[in-house]
Amino acid sequence: MLFRLLVLSIVIGEVLGEYKNYDGFKILEVNFENPRVKKYVQEFDKNLGFMPDFLGENWKKKQAHYFINKDSVEKVKTNLVANNITYQMRDVNPQIFKVRRRRDLNGAITINDINNRYLSYDEQMQFLNSISQQYPNDVKLQKLGNSFEGRSITAVRIGDDGSNKPIVWIDAGIHAREWISYNVALYLIYTIVSQPAYRDLLNSVQLVVVPNTNPDGYEFSRTVDRMWRKTRSRFTNSRCGGADANRNYPFFWGTQGVSHSQCSEVYCGARPQSEPEVLALTNAIQREETRIKGYIALHSYGQEILYPWGHTQRTYPSDVEDLIKVGRAMASAIQAVNNTEYNVVNSGDGLYPAAGASDDWAKSRGIKYSYTIELSPIDDYIGFSLPEDRINQVCREAFQAIQVLMIEVKSKFGIKHSTSSVSSPSAQSSLLLKRMRTTANRGFGRGK
């Protein structure tokens, strides 16, 4: 109890303090199309003596983006010049560090809020409660566990009628600073429940959505440190806290693409499932893993659909062609909305393998279709601070991709319902998927 009170006092102090100042920090951009440069950045930790915060990459331009703290800027520049590496450094977009204002929770949270602004954790939970009350026959809320600081990790079960339907599982926000992922999950919940067109699909496939898998980190990123990525667990005798929950899953844990330093952005934790958030998610999935046929982890940024394996390079599941085919169908569905291009690529074959990630673990548990989607944007200047006027477009695009996965699961594993009308929603969806599959483009590629 004393420990929890101490944690609470620390949290309150952080929330009341100043928003973290990133003056002097830089965004580093390196073009890795040249094999020599690619090898150099793959060994950044050896070349620099530390691993800079890897933000993402622009797969179209083959550029990698890093966040460099102000104390390391000159060291990085010197090292790059000494190794004849061409680079760019730019100031950080000041809009990233705009503190979010909390609003009065007396007003209802609506889909208009989801489409136009980033919500607090409390607002997200208020929205879920409202949806479950509005659609009591279709939506059930399930508590999976608590975060380190005691916030509920809530799953939304849609179309759960007690039958043995196959499940598509979606979770979002394991990395706190990736705000658009939370909105996409909430938009998905509302849209598929409120629109009669998806009734037929839900008769055959159950959807489980966990819209906030790292509530502590998310609130910390909203109120204290916009670039916070990890959980908020505390360690004895350490000035650093939190672990990268997407390196904490119990599959090839602690091997590649991780750090065992508590201060690293990719710290994998003291042991697999050390983070209560990861333990809650893995326990919940394992209870139903024989029914779960599709899994998507929503992340940002980069406009990519990633498939396993990600813990190593040039190693693929035996059914990799199935993963590629459905991944391309999802990318085609996204592009049909507003011509936004997503790359369909292997998680481990690019700059860095990433062991202990959720999509690898899900696939290892026998879940047929397992993906990570890196949502828009693709450029590092906007990065994690996707403007609020673009939220709705990204939500609509991602919804179409998730619908494609649900249709595929229905086709292969769903409960069959006879129908004589080719104009039924299920028939239309099957035809849509068939058309999307004819799009032949892009092959193996990049890593997380």
Image (spheres, rainbow, N blue to C red):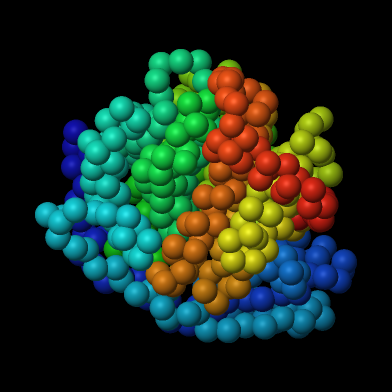
Residue at x-position 27% and y-position 30%: 136
Occupied quadrant, residue 446: bottom right
Residue at x-position 74% and y-position 69%: 60
Residue, far front = 420
Relative to the observer, which residue lies in front, 129 or 175?
Answer: 129
Q: Position of residue 68 (x, y in %)?
A: 56, 72
Q: What is the total number of numbered labels drawn onto the structure image?
A: 0
Residue, far top = 163
Residue at x-position 42% and y-position 28%: 159
Report the side of 263 relative to 152 (left or right): right
Relative to the observer, which residue lies in front, 285 or 428?
Answer: 428
> Would residue 101 be visible to someone looking at this image?
yes
Residue at x-position 48% and y-position 57%: 395
Decide: is 140 above or below 28: above
Report the side of 322 relative to 230 (left or right): right
Which corner quadrant holds the N terminus?
top left
Q: Position of residue 410 (x, y in %)?
A: 60, 29
Residue, far left = 106
Relative to the observer, which residue lies in front, 147 or 281?
Answer: 281
Occupied quadrant, residue 94: bottom left
